[in-house]
Image (cartoon, rainbow, N blue to C red):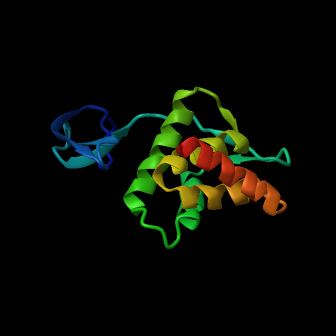
């Protein structure tokens, strides 16, 4: 690691500890040339994921968008934000683990619906109604009947 003060390339690690909820490691280092101390952070390099939208356009995956959609679906519902953040993290991890670099919005939406169904059925129906673009009351009732059949 190159010293930010003198540019010397040799340093020794004085202290290491987890940082950012164990997603990185914070290291205190001391330059072997000038003796000054500095901090570095070590994280796992993740490959960028691209989301392919329904119109064919592409954009970078943004976990905040997944979380935002779930928050809107759960408005005025007894679902803790921590639970939604955990779900968003699990979905992101599933996508990273799949090793696919391009993911369709359909795949992401299905993963969100699968998880919301077990957390809060009203939030699930809200999300599904926007995601699947229910055109009329019949498609809405069809989805509700599926939900009722699964619950029995």
- Residue 139: where, in percent of width, then height? 79, 55
Tell me where residue 127 sits by quadrant: bottom right
The location of residue 122, given as percent across then percent down, is: 56, 61
Identify the residue at the far top of this view: 99
- Name the foreground residue: 67 vs 78: 78
> Where is residue 75 shown, x and y percent of the image?
53, 70
Q: Residue at x 70, y 51 (%)?
A: 143
Measured along the vertical axis of the image, is residue 150 above or below residue 127?
A: above
**Residue 57: image x %, image y %?**
81, 47
The structure residue drawn at horizontal position 30% and vertical position 48%, both measured from the top left corner, is 21
**Residue 146 visible somewhere in the drawing:** yes
Give the answer, above or below, for where 86 lies relative to 98: below
Q: Residue at x 39, y 62 (%)?
A: 80
The residue nearer to you, when weighing 44 against 108, is 108
Q: Quadrant of residue 138?
A: bottom right
**Residue under the point 58% across and 53% down:** 66
Q: Position of 128 compared to 20: left or right?
A: right
Q: Is residue 61 visible?
A: no
In the rendered image, which quarter is residue 133 located in?
bottom right
- Residue 122 lies left or right of residue 57; in this view the side is left
């Amino acid at each position: 690691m190159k010293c930010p003060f003198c540019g010397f390339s040799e340093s020794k690690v004085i202290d290491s500890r987890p940082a950012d909820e164990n997603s990185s490691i914070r290291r205190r280092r001391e330059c072997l040339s000038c003796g000054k101390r500095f901090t570095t952070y070590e994280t796992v390099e993740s490959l960028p994921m691209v989301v392919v939208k329904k119109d064919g356009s592409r954009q970078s995956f943004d976990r905040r968008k997944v979380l935002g959609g779930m928050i809107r679906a759960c408005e005025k519902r007894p679902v803790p934000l921590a639970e939604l953040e955990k779900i968003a993290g699990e979905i992101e991890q599933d996508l990273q683990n799949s090793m696919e670099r391009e993911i369709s919005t359909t795949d992401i939406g299905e993963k969100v619906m699968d998880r919301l169904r077990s957390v809060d059925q009203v939030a699930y129906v809200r999300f599904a109604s926007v995601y699947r673009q229910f055109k009329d009351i019949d498609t809405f009732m069809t989805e509700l009947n599926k939900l009722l059949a699964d619950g029995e």
